[in-house]
Image: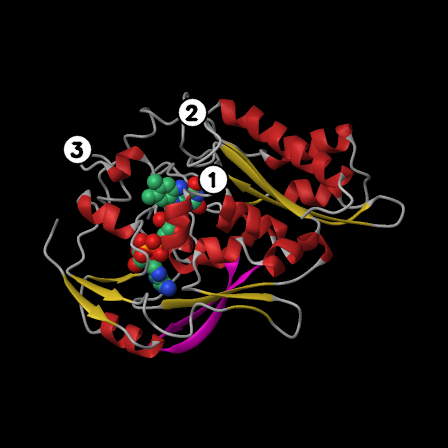
Amino acid sequence: MTPFSIRNASSPQGAVDALSAHDNARYLAGGTTLIDLMKLGVEKPTTLVYVDDMPGLGAIEVVRDGSLRIGALARMSQVADDPRVKAGWPMVSQALWKAASAQLRNMASIGGNLLQRTRCPYFRDTAFAHCNKRVPGSGCDAMDGHNRENALLGTSSNCIALHPSDLCVALTALDARVETLSRDGPRVLPFDALHLLPGDRPHVENALRPGELVTAVVVPGSAAARRSLYLKVRDRQSYQFALTSVAAGLDLEPDGSVRDVRLGLGGVATKPWRALAAEKFLVGHRIDEATAFEAGRRAMEGAVARKGNAFKVELMHRTVVDALLQLARAESIS
Ligand SMILES: Cc1cc2nc3c(=O)[nH]c(=O)nc-3n(C[C@H](O)[C@H](O)[C@H](O)COP(=O)(O)OP(=O)(O)OC[C@H]3O[C@@H](n4cnc5c(N)ncnc54)[C@H](O)[C@@H]3O)c2cc1C
């Protein structure tokens, strides 16, 4: 591991100032992504700004307009287990419950979850020479290599690394917002604007400015958020990243047709993915096997499959169908 020093931040402004004062510095929260990557030699910061002890950023609140506001330092387990989250935003609670392990969920923060990095083996293992994300311009060994866990949507000719977060799939489906603080002051980003497609610069993963600190995530309340679920398909039933996952929310008219539907996809894309074409198709239709099947097909339109991950086209199709049919049958999900 490259030698580094640690600065403790006691306030968000102090954290921003400390990070901005050092080249090659990173925020350290729970450390469950960053310390791993430092041990692997992928990340080599020379200064860590420890934010985990800062007071005031760990709160979970339902604010006046009915939105859920989650402080960036809330633990994954705290949010997953909060009765207000379970009742009003089940897909958020379930996405967190189904992520990582109990120990990791107790340690890891919401801000860190948003900014965790890909699990692509060619990115994480420095023995591989060609990874445009780790070494810009070096190529991409995943294209023709072991790409079973890599992305099919949002890819470019430079990178097919998958975005791994479960929580982010639910947040994109529910039109969340991200609150931040930087030297330019506070700002709010639509969740969809936080993560960037790889394009020809896969090493630039998010829209945060240098030194910008995530302070909170705000998730609007809605009928579709209340009637929602997170379905995750994986090689084993716990402690495993998604092969495919769907964050689905549904609001029906009195006649049973769809008034509002939300479909976030995980395990298949380079950033948290919203299946907008499938959502658009479903509005005004009743959900039955035929409409769910068509929505599943539309969800994967534009997918670019590789040898190892082609099975995910069919698997995601079925995951969408299953999620929609479960939701349509459910009186209420909690
Ligand atoms: C074995 C294992 C299995 C896992 N399985 C899953 C899974 O199934 N699903 C899933 O979703 N995740 C999974 N994870 C990932 C885990 O959820 C993340 O590691 C965790 O959420 C990161 O949070 P942290 O507080 O530890 O972040 P850290 O490691 O401290 O930070 C991660 C990154 O975010 C930056 N950062 C942290 N906080 C802020 C902030 N407030 N503002 C700006 N930047 C910040 C850091 O600089 C760093 O770059 C797994 C991890 C491991 C190790």
Q: Based on the picture, tell me whether residue 266 belongs to the magenta stretch.
A: no
x and y percentages locating residue 51 in the rendered image? 31, 67
Q: Nearer the viewer, residue 152 or 64?
A: 64
**What kind of element bears circle 3?**
loop
Distance from Cα at disc 2 to Cα at disc 1:
13 Å
Mark 3 sits near ligand 1, with its Cβ under 8 Å away: no
Mark 3: amino acid: Ala
Which residue is outermost to the right? 255
Q: Nearer the viewer, residue 148 or 82?
A: 82
Mark identifier at residue 306: 2
Part of the protein shown in magenta: 175-191
x and y percentages locating residue 139 in the rendered image? 26, 36
Q: Residues within 10 Å of mark 3 (few under 14, many from 20)?
A: few
Residue carrying label 3:
127
**What kind of element bears circle 2?**
loop
Image vertical order of residue 220 relative to residue 14, above or below: above
Mark identifier at residue 269: 1
Q: Residues within 10 Å of mark 1 (few under 14, many from 20)?
A: many
Using the rendered view, name the quadrant where residue 143 is placed: top left
Mark 1: amino acid: Ala
Nearer to us of marks 2 and 1 is 1
